[in-house]
Amino acid sequence: MSEEINTFGELNLNSWIVKQCSLIGVKKPTPIQKNCIPRILAGDDCIGCAKTGSGKTLAFVLPIVQKLCEDPYGIFALVLTPTRELASQIGEQFTAIGKPINLKTCVVLGGMDMMTQAQELSKRPHIVVATPGRLADHLESCDTFSLNKLKFVVLDEADRLLGGDFDEQIKTIFSALPKQRQSLLFSATMTDALEQVKQVARNNVFQFEDDDDS
Ligand code: ADP
Ligand code: MG
């Protein structure tokens, strides 16, 4: 479908976002980016499966930042990921791309002080990137922290988040989300748990096998 696309501009991303990409050395979209970005911009749920290193982070960061410019009220997007290291890296990508609009990203990790984090969350960040356990703790302990205006939820490394140890925490978090939202799932592998939620994304399930560089 999208083999001829060679630039981010052709994916209907704003020129300032394309410029931010080139500032971080990213010029030509990868296959997962070519397929997911237009669907996310169009308002669809989406599941993207591609090997580690294929650029799944920007596949959701870029369209979310673009959409945020249209309607920046309350916490706009929540990204869940299994490890602190991944959460920090995702937070950095949002910060790098969103610099010209002063995008505020809050990274919520286990091991950090709860009170300090609660203060950061109360400053109304646009994006919250979190590990599930710590975010569930905040939702359960803090009445003022709310995700009810959220427009996007992203499960990054969804294969590791679904169908295992995180299930209880994910359930707590999803019960705090508005029904009207876009759900985006990214994973290196298609697991049984992911197969089960495939229908939410209808036709927007993009799977790339190893070494697919088209
Ligand atoms: P994944 O989540 O699929 O494992 P990442 O999103 O972490 O992969 O991206 C891996 C690396 O590739 C990062 O350093 C990122 O900045 C870089 N990258 C992402 N998209 C592109 C692109 N279109 N061109 C070049 N490098 C890219
Ligand atoms: Mg990743």
Image: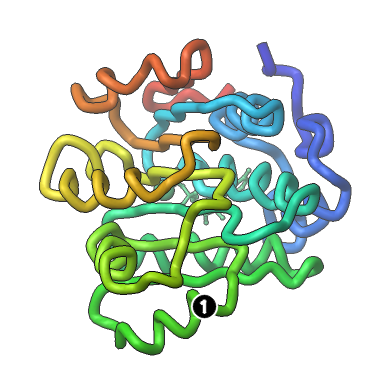
Q: Which quadrant holds residue 127?
A: bottom right
Residue topped by disc 1:
122
Query: Residue 169: x percent and y percent?
Result: 21, 52
- Residue 32 picture location, percent across and down: 54, 30
x 85%, y 54%: residue? 16
Quadrant in which the N terminus is drawn? top right
Q: Nearer the viewer, residue 68 or 4?
A: 68
Label 1 lies in ligand 2 vicinity (Cβ under 8 Å): no
Q: Which residue is drawn at 24% across and 80% down?
A: 111
Residue in the image at 34% along x and 44% along y: 174
Tell me which residue sits at (63%, 71%) in the image: 104
Which residue is farthest right?
Answer: 15
User: Disc count in the image?
Assistant: 1
> Going by the picture, which residue comes out furthest to the left?
165
Eyeballing the image, is 196 above or below 97? above
Left or right: 89 as drawn, with respect to 104 = left
> Which quarter of the image is occupied by the C terminus?
top right
Which quadrant of the view contains residue 4?
Answer: top right
Residue 157 placement (x, y as % from top left): 33, 44
Q: Nearer the viewer, residue 146 or 97?
A: 146
Residue 34 x/y as whole percent: 65, 28
Scheme of image coloration = rainbow
User: On the rendered structure, is 74 left or right of 69?
Assistant: left
Indicate the amino acid at tag 1: Ser
* SS for dot 1: helix
Task: Please tell me how crowded label 1 is: few (under 14), some (14-19), or many (20+) other residues with Cα within 10 Å.
Answer: few
In the shown orientation, is residue 98 left or right of residue 56? right
Residue 126 vs 191, above or below: the answer is: below
User: Is 52 displayed left or right of 67 in the figure?
Assistant: left
